[in-house]
Amino acid sequence: MLNKKGKIFVLSGPSGCGKNTVFEGIQQFNKNVAQTVSVTTRAPRTNEKNGIDYYFVEKEEFLRKIENNEFIEYALYGENYYGTLKSEVDRLVDNGNIVILVIEVQGAANIKKVMPESKSIFLLPPSLDELGKRLRSREQNTEAEINMRMNIALEEIKFKDSYDFCVLNDDLDKCIQDVNDIITK
């Protein structure tokens, strides 16, 4: 049982490693788990809804939020900005939730600076070949975008040792169980 305030975990890994799928699986185990809704300047994917999957905003509005110090972290990933609102984190933690921030490596490093009590988990794909297959199977990115994401993934994987925990996502059910074990202990 949580005290009055909740806990904060960061879940990171390369694009296509299964961060959102793992998070959704954890929610099936633990009803105290909550995820903030991030803000992004990228266009919505098919079936994504504003205010549920992301807050989709124009670059100018995102930059205004930076100026107003509204983000606990933000990063430029490829050509788009992504950020986590302070107000989202505060609301969920104050309600006693286990907050999982599903964010990129840049954002995770920023969270550790401003919230050293947070714990970080890095998801690793089984291989770079498998990661490429996962990105292609989404059928949502051009080959140039996939190549850019693969290059970013190579850089992100270099930071895995700076995380508190590293979990291999080669068996989804086992990965979900491993991450759930981390957040509940």
Image (tube, helix red, strand yellow):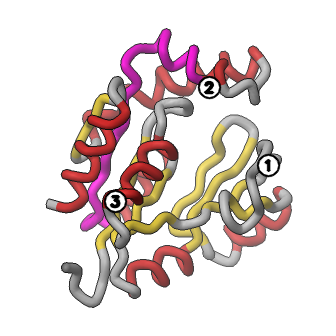
Residue assigned mark 1? 44
Secondary structure under tag 2 reads helix
| Residue type of the residue flagged with mark 2 | Arg
Image point (37%, 33%), residue name: 172
For this view, does 179 lie left or right of residue 46?
left
**Residue found at the very far bottom of the displayed protein:** 4
Secondary structure under tag 3 reads strand
| Residue type of the residue flagged with mark 3 | Phe
Question: Sequence order check: which comes first, mark 1 or mark 2?
Answer: 1
Q: Nearer the viewer, mark 1 or mark 3?
A: 1
Q: Which mark is residue 149?
A: 2
Which image quarter is the N terminus in?
Answer: bottom left
Secondary structure under tag 1 reads loop
Dot 2: few (<14), some (14–19), or many (≥20) neighbours within 10 Å?
A: many
Q: Residue 85: x percent and y percent? A: 58, 71
Q: Nearer the viewer, mark 1 or mark 2?
A: 1
Q: Residue 159: x percent and y percent? A: 36, 33
